[in-house]
Image (spheres, helix red, strand yellow):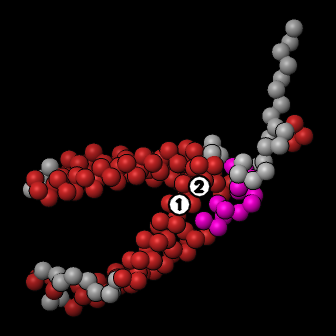
């Protein structure tokens, strides 16, 4: 006797109420996964480089590197959760995006726009001073882009069609 073939609810909309999978969520999930994996692959090199520093400096930086590693693992889990359309992953992404926007806003608002003094060989060079001004302006623009991009992505992740895709809206 032949085994009956199963028809996917994505191929047959009448078979179930599974919403379509948005390309936006899939792209963001894969970007999150790829970035997290790449950063996790760099962590052993960073930890090895810490051994070249003085023990007091290396200890404080090692804690920061380990916290960064934990954040990368959390982002990796979140990316997989987004691919699986888990609502907790969507909420975690919204919280992460809010944290990025807030961090950048605080940084832009508290920065006085000056750079720390350079060592003597570089401090007297006008070309270096001009390069630092350009770099500072680029960082301000990057901060604004991160704020706007994070707010836009937060909006997208909280829209009704995306919430429905994650089962958060029936």
The secondary structure type at the circle numbered 2 is helix
Instruction: Identify the residue at image location x=51%, y=74%.
Output: 147
Marks 2 and 1, how far apart at CA: 6 Å
162 magenta-colored: yes
Q: Position of residue 139 (x, y in %)?
A: 39, 78
Q: Position of residue 9 (x, y in %)?
A: 82, 37
In the rendered structure, the answer to whether residue 87 lies left or right of residue 113 reads right
Q: Nearer the viewer, residue 124 or 104?
A: 104
| CB contact under 8 Å: marks 2 and 1 | yes
Q: Position of residue 51 (x, y in %)?
A: 14, 49
Task: Say whether residue 82 is visible.
Answer: no
Q: Quadrant of residue 125?
A: bottom left
Instruction: Identify the residue at image location x=33%, y=52%.
Output: 67
In the rendered structure, the answer to whether residue 147 lies left or right of residue 90 reads left
Dot 1: within a 10 Å radius of its alpha carbon, few (fewer than 14), some, or many (20 or more) residues? Answer: few
Residue identifier under label 2: 91
Instruction: Identify the residue at image location x=71%, y=55%.
Output: 163
Residue identifier under label 1: 95
Q: Position of residue 36 (x, y in %)?
A: 44, 50
> How would you classify the magenta stretch by its main secondary structure?
helix
In the rendered structure, the answer to whether residue 53 lies left or right of residue 105 reads left
Instruction: Identify the residue at image location x=28%, y=53%.
Output: 65
The secondary structure type at the circle numbered 1 is helix
Task: Say whether residue 130 is visible.
Answer: yes
Q: Nearer the viewer, residue 135 or 53?
A: 53
**What segment is highlighted magenta in the picture?**
153-166
**Looking at the image, residue 168 lies above or below residue 123:** above
89 magenta-colored: no
Q: Quadrant of residue 56?
A: bottom left
**Position of the N terminus by quadrant:** top right
């Amino acid at each position: 006797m032949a085994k009956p073939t199963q028809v996917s609810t994505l191929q047959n909309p009448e078979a179930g109420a599974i919403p379509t999978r948005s390309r936006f969520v899939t792209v963001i999930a894969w970007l999150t996964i790829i970035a997290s994996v790449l950063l996790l692959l760099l962590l052993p090199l960073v930890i090895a480089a810490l051994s070249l520093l003085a023990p007091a400096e290396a200890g404080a930086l090692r804690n920061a590197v380990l916290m960064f590693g934990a954040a990368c693992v959390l982002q990796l889990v979140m990316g997989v959760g987004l691919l699986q359309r888990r609502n907790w992953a969507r909420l975690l992404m919204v919280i992460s995006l809010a944290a990025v926007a807030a961090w950048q806003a605080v940084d832009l608002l508290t920065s006085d726009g000056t750079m720390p003094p350079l060592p003597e060989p570089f401090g007297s060079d006008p070309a270096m001073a001009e390069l630092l001004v350009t770099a500072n302006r680029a960082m301000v623009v990057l901060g604004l882009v991160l704020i706007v991009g994070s707010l836009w992505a937060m909006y997208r992740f909280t829209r009704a069609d995306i919430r429905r895709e994650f089962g958060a809206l029936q």
